[in-house]
Amino acid sequence: MYDIIVIGGGPAGLTAALYALRADKSVLVLEKAAFGGQITFSPKVENIPGQPAISGNDFAAALVDQVIELGAELEPAEVTEIRDGGEVKTVVADDGAEYAAKAVIIATGAKHRRLGLDNEENLIGSGISFCAVCDGAFYQGRTVGVVGGGNSALQEALLLSELAEKVIMIQNLPYLTGEKRLQDSVLNKPNIEVILGSVVAEYKGRDKLEGIVAESESGERKEIPLDGLFIAIGLEPQNAAFANVLPLDGFGYAAADESCRTETAGIFVAGDCRAKKIRQVTTAAADGAVAALAACDYIDGR
């Protein structure tokens, strides 16, 4: 049995593991995708104190190495259930494996939101992507679209503008919502076109994306040929499997105060899956530290 099981291997989960290990607790980290989390998709991160610029992948790799060096066990697994047995929590993985711990920290983060259009899932990986740093090179010298108008979408568009011949941004609001510095950079790029007040109403192509149909607020529809489309409209929390042990708000985020404790004794939550206003790598790491120290206090009976 472990002292603490951390579900999720992003900055929140890995920081939680770091603090728990330094408190001399045994720690298992379970992650269903890539250790490092969403930050691994960021080619350049400039808001980490003491790091003027670092790639998200390098930052994540350093975190992983740090917790392994301290003795953490890392296992690739998707957690489907947590059973609360009081002093012992049982974490169940999708392959049927069960792991026991005195405390559990949920740091599952969030996944990319979809548009929910017909044939979308079929086209993901065949023209639809969520990560310019991962897939942008496939569209060298071609025409791509970016859906969204926040920081993530603006950053995707800027990265793609260095590779693609043309980038077309589609934003449902009549204005962009990201930082002014990013907006200015996008608007000053000659190969980026911004279409405001419009939504993607339809995908063209069955087995491979051939374009989209954009629909304006007035109902006018326009077909736009595209070689690829990058969706950057935010994230959705990955908490559904844990609704039995922690309350969720109307958006699916875990309800927990700044102590990162939940209503279930011994269950803690950290990072982007927690209900809060600001979601940044620094706040995720802060959550991880707070949750780990709270879990240690719980185990030690304090």
Image (cartoon, helix red, strand yellow):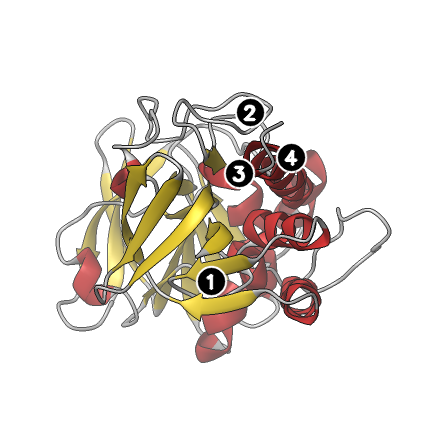
Quadrant in the rendering for residue 148: top left
Q: Give the residue displayed 68% in from the left and 35% down from the top.
A: 180
Q: CA gap, disc 1 to disc 3?
A: 24 Å
x, y percentage for residue 78?
Answer: 32, 60
Residue 12 against residue 300 in the figure, above or below: below
Camera-side mark, 3 or 2 = 3
Would residue 267 be found to the left or right of residue 160 on screen?
left
Assess whether mark 4 and mark 3 are in contact (beta carbons under 8 angstroms): yes
The residue labelled by disc 1 is 131
Q: Which element carries disc 2, helix, strand or loop? A: loop
Q: Which element carries disc 3, helix, strand or loop? A: loop
First along the sequence among labels 1 and 3: 1
Query: Which one is nearer the viewer's eye here, 158 or 36?
Result: 36
Residue type at mark 4? Val
Camera-side mark, 4 or 2 = 4
The residue labelled by disc 2 is 277
x, y percentage for residue 89?
Answer: 36, 44
Residue type at mark 2? Lys
Assess whether mark 2 and mark 1 are in contact (beta carbons under 8 angstroms): no
Residue type at mark 1? Cys
Is there any visible trace of residue 109 in the rendered image?
Answer: no
